[in-house]
Image (cartoon, rainbow, N blue to C red):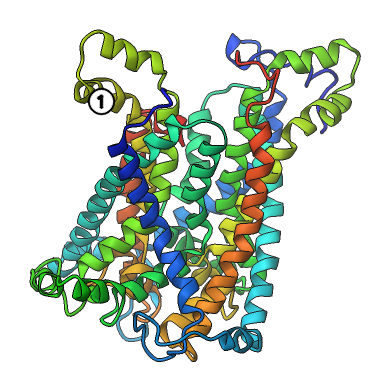
Amino acid sequence: MSAPPSALGAGRPVRSGRRTPRWPLLLLIPPLLWLGVLYLGSLLGLLSYSFRSVDDFTGQVLPGSTLASFQALFVPSNLDIIRRTLVMSVAVTVACALIAFPVALLIARSRGPRKATLLLLVTLPLWASYLVRVYAWRLILAQEGVIRYFANRLGLGGALDALLATPGIGGTSLANSSLGMFLVFVYVWLPYMILPLQAALERVPASLLQASADLGARPAQTFRRVLLPLALPGLAAGSIFTFSLTLGDYIIPSVVGAPGFFIGQMVYTQQGAANNLPLAAAFSVVPIVIVTLYLSLARRLGAFDAL
Amino acid sequence: MTSSSSWPLRLAAGAGLLFLHFPLALIALYAFTTEDRTYAFPPPGLTTKWFAVAFARQDMWAALWLSVRVALGATAIALVLGTLLAFAMTRTRFRGQGAITLLTVLPIALPGIVTGLALLVSLRRLGVSPGVATIIIGHATFCIVTIYNNVSARLRRLSASQLEASADLGARPAQTFRYVLLPHLATALLAGGLLSFALSFDEVIVTTFTAGPQQTLPIWLYGELFKPRQRPVTNVVALIVMAVTFVPILLAQRLTLGTDDPSGAGKGT
């Protein structure tokens, strides 16, 4: 530490006002060089590629700027990809929030070793490799897999077939359906929703809920008027993860799911096999714009304090 | 919050937790199956022979070793940069602080595919060939936020009065740092470091863009998923990866458990 004398000791509570020390600004230099120059610079470089075009014959990126790649985004087939990805991201986020709420609430209401154990139970799957978890679902969703086995044993094989015959969510097997993909997404991102939600619920003072009950609110009213608004920052924080992770993922749609590209797969294919870096860049601008809008909204809801 | 929980809540929460763990149990089961062509459930028989087969695979060991090196490198960089950032952000106030918070969150908030592609484009422009170093650079970028979050949370809970007391008692800044601040931060650094290690060890999307021909363990697993040479081997490796990552996580959990609410840390800050 190259702090000037007594600088560390002189630190007043930061919030108390104007006289905060200036020397910590120096510490910002290395991380800002990394994040600002290396990372943000790369992002801007990527953006600049989206205004370039590619020679159809040689595959070379041509000089000069054009909006052709962005125009290409509005071709019906590409709009379809964007719509499909967005619908899935929203559906996954809503489902994660619904499943996460009771788990988060139970953890927030627990104390001591019980709480630690519950938290551990939520985080452990997160640390089982992402690919491992996706792979596990291939076992579950496979034609000869677990779900089919139990469905048949319980006499629900017909119901499963009917579900798979439903257009939009079905497919030849669960592993090849949007429904299957949805399940995997929800499973894989669920802990990212539970943890911030739990943190937000934990901060709700019990006295507030008691006061609500004392004032004659039914549990449902207390939930809607008191608990839910206070949980909103946590929900918003969790949704940043579930939404954004779904938006950009290309592994899950390529391992399970119905035919039809997602944004991530499109970016991957365009930069790789199709060798159209400008179109890949334009496609990657879509999640950047959506996530930036989302982040600014989430920030207003106080999500950054709940991260 | 009250400690009583109604049974519908317990039931719903229990179902959620079961949902989270069932697939993992299944991986463990399939690592022992005698059936190596399909995912048939239930497995027709059980065997331990796939463990021997997995351990004999040189490509698996190479990928594992690369993953460990990358995770160590990325964590080391992230520890330094994340801690500096946390100090700067909690010890002073300035214009544009919100923008820096946003910049820190961005690498994990933006989809990995964007981060990966952006880095790839830059590396190509700079003429850097992909390799171990470029994987580390990519991973460190999103690991910084883990360390930053852990350290800044701990710093915010550390009341300034403790540092003032140290100074009043005649400690030089270096001494305050060594004897007051560092012990206070130690578990946050360790926990953040372990999380960062696990994050890097598991990352696959950014890695596909920055790795070139190099194979980290997740990339290796991804390859096995698509064209498996021996299906149960994938399960064995998956099981091993789980075991390897669970141990540091359990350790981190234990380490932060007692110190989560440091006594005397003061709730005023």
Give coordinates of residue A175: x percent, y percent.
Answer: 27, 75
Q: Determine the residue positioned at 38% across, 55% down.
A: B18
Give coordinates of residue B5: x percent, y percent.
Answer: 36, 31
Asked if residue A250 shows in the view, the reply is yes
Q: Vertical placement of B248 versus B58: above or below?
A: above
Disc 1 target residue: A223
Chain letter of the residue beneath label 1 in the structure image: A
Asked if residue A269 shows in the view, the reply is no
Give coordinates of residue A277: x percent, y percent.
Answer: 38, 71
Query: Left or right: where does residue A162 sit relative to residue A208?
Result: left
Give coordinates of residue B124: x percent, y percent.
Answer: 54, 70
Is the N terminus of chain A in the top left, top right, bottom left or bottom right quadrant?
top right
Q: Determine the residue positioned at 53% across, 36% down.
A: B100
Q: Vertical placement of B235 versus B260: above or below?
A: below
Amino acid type shown at disc 1: Phe
Query: Left or right: where does residue B121 sit relative to residue A59?
Result: right
